[in-house]
Image (spheres, helix red, strand yellow):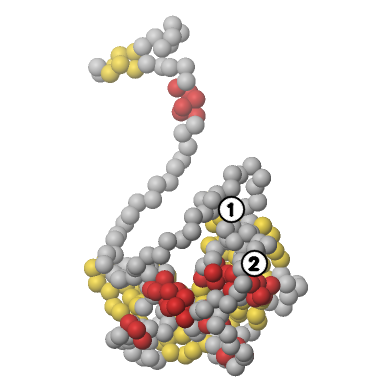
């Protein structure tokens, strides 16, 4: 309080003016606070890897490593299991669900991917349990090619995304980004090489667990451009039939003033079946390499999560604890 602004009394309240009050008021802006509207508890026994809204605006699916559940948005205490891949004996487990996505137009169609490199397209009208009546998208060229211990690991699909036209689907495995026409189940329309230069280093990538990294993918609103991430925080952007086959590579979130973030080694969680399959791979592998080969790229800086704006050529990239936007 100062002499130019004496205190005032109104209805028993004592009001004072302070010198920094105007500054405090000026700095207060509009803020948005998220509030939980509804909780859907006890839905899964394992970590949820996907949630996808249906085009009917009434239902959505949630997926973990073994099951996909169908929910009504207004009913939080009941769901329907539509895909169940859990074997009667867990020793017989051969694959896990890695991603699930509803068709953007037809509310009865659902796609989900697996650790064996398959994308299954199911029609929920055919059966209450959809895991046996599915159209399978798989690359026939890879299934007939040469095999190694790492073949099945790098074939695991980490993410799938439908294009807005509903006719094309994008899938990402460790090595490649593939564009599919859902009417062609044996050959992708296009294959974009992401980590081909890492193929000679697969043994090193396996030893430090990097081979199990799950990179997401994204499609532009017009369905003509595709994006995914890589190591050293690299953002890879491709176009089908336009530009070079190598696409465009930019470093996401390059900021010299930003302090580097030390990422701790991931800890295995009992609730994830993906870690169980990782352990099975390790038990079957005998490392024949003599000594450690230093990798020339930054494995601790990796662009795993990204999303393309539905109507604008704007890509959101999650880099450590920061969110960056890139105009494509």
For the view shown, which residue lies furthest in the top direction?
A: 3
274 left or right of 303 in image: left
Query: Eyeballing the image, is 104 above or below 94?
Result: above
Q: Picture coordinates of residue 299 (x, y %)?
A: 59, 61
Residue at image mark 2: 293
Relative image position of residue 153 (x, y in whole percent): 52, 78
Point 46% across, 85% down: residue: 121
Residue at 61% x, 85% y is 188
- The residue singled out by tag 1 in the image is 324
Please tell me whether mark 2 sits on a helix, a strand or a loop. Answer: loop
Query: Which residue is pictured at 66% across the width and 45% down the height?
Result: 256
Q: Mark 1 and mark 2: span between their CA atoms?
A: 33 Å
**Is residue 200 at least partly visible in the picture?**
yes
Is residue 211 or residue 112 the one in the foreground? 211
Give the image quarter of residue 96: bottom left
Number of other residues with Cα within 10 Å of mark 1, as a class: few under 14, some 14 to 19, many 20 or more: few
Tell me if residue 309 can be seen. no
Question: Which quadrant: the N terminus?
Answer: top left
- Identify which residue is drawn at 66% across, 75% down: 200
**Tag count in the figure?**
2
Question: Of 20 and 142, which appears nearest the observer?
Answer: 142
Q: Which mark is residue 134?
A: none
Residue 72 percent coordinates (x, y): 31, 71
- Mark 1 or mark 2: whose residue is earlier in sequence: 2
């Amino acid at each position: 309080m100062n002499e130019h602004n004496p205190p005032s009394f109104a209805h028993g309240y004592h009001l004072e003016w302070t010198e920094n009050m105007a500054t405090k008021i000026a700095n207060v802006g509009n803020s948005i606070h998220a509030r939980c509207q509804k909780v859907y508890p006890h839905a899964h026994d394992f970590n949820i890897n996907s949630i996808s809204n249906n085009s009917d605006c009434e239902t959505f699916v949630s997926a973990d490593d073994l099951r996909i559940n169908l929910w009504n948005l207004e009913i939080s205490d009941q769901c329907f299991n539509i895909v169940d891949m859990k074997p009667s004996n867990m020793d017989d487990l051969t694959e896990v669900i890695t991603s699930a996505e509803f068709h953007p137009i037809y509310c009865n169609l659902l796609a989900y991917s697996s650790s064996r490199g398959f994308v299954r397209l199911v029609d929920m009208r055919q059966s209450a349990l959809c895991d046996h009546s599915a159209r399978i998208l798989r690359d026939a060229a890879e299934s007939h090619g040469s095999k190694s211990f790492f073949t099945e690991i790098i074939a695991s699909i980490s993410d799938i995304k439908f294009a807005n036209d509903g006719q094309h689907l994008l899938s990402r495995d460790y090595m490649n980004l593939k564009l599919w026409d859902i009417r062609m189940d044996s050959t992708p329309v296009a294959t974009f090489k992401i980590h081909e230069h890492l193929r000679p280093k697969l043994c090193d990538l396996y030893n430090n667990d990097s081979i199990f990294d799950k990179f997401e993918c994204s499609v532009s609103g017009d369905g003509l451009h595709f994006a995914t991430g890589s190591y050293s925080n690299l953002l890879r952007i491709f176009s089908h039939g336009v530009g070079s086959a190598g696409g465009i590579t930019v470093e996401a979130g390059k900021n010299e003033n930003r302090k580097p973030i030390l990422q701790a080694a991931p800890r295995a969680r009992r609730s994830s079946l993906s870690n169980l399959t990782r352990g099975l791979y390790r038990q079957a592998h005998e490392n024949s390499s003599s000594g450690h080969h230093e990798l020339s790229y930054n494995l601790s800086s990796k662009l795993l999560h990204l999303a393309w704006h539905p109507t604008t050529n704007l890509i959101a990239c999650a880099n450590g604890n920061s969110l960056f936007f890139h105009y494509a």
